[in-house]
Amino acid sequence: MTKEDVVWIVIKTIGICLLVLALMNLKGLVHSQYMANKSNSFMSNDYFVYKEATKEYFVEVVFYMLMGLYMTCKGKLLYRIACSPLKKEDEEET
């Protein structure tokens, strides 16, 4: 197994972990949206707390989902960055 193969495995594994995190936060998103809709008065403090939680969960789910999908489906930019050879100034001078 070469270095390039290991890099692809690591990128894909991190992508799968991010997708799992997105699914775990999806539960919190649904729960906070349900609780915000359940509170009848818009002037209650609970309504605003759950609305803020809904926004935070939504941003987290979208971020984790996009990063996870990029890493599992493509990830070419990360692969190029990880596998690019490092140039040393000493080697260039000789």
Image (cartoon, rainbow, N blue to C red):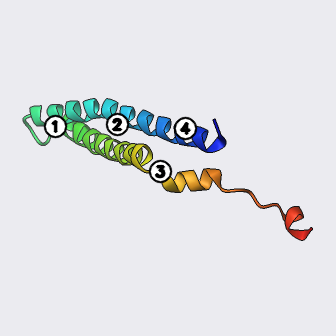
The residue to which callout 3 is attached is: 75
- Which of the two labelled residues, at mark 3 and mark 4, occupies the earlier sequence position? 4
What quarter of the picture does the C terminus occupy? bottom right
Q: Which residue is mark 1?
A: 44
- Numbered label attached to residue 22: 2
Could you say where residue 73 lies in the image, as x and y percent from the top left? 39, 46
Q: Which comes before the other along the chain, label 2 or label 1?
A: 2
Q: Earlier in the sequence, mark 4 or mark 2?
A: 4
Q: Residues within 10 Å of mark 2 (few under 14, many from 20)?
A: many
| Structural distance between the alpha carbons of marks 2 and 1 | 29 Å
Q: Secondary structure at mark 3?
A: loop
Which secondary structure, mark 2?
A: helix
Q: On the image, which quarter does residue 1 sit in?
A: top right
User: What x and y, as percent, mark residue 63?
Assistant: 37, 47
Q: Is residue 54 left or right of residue 5?
A: left
Nearer-N-terminus badge (3/1): 1
The amino acid pointed to by label 1 is Ser
Q: Earlier in the sequence, mark 4 or mark 1?
A: 4
- The residue pinned by badge 4 equals 10
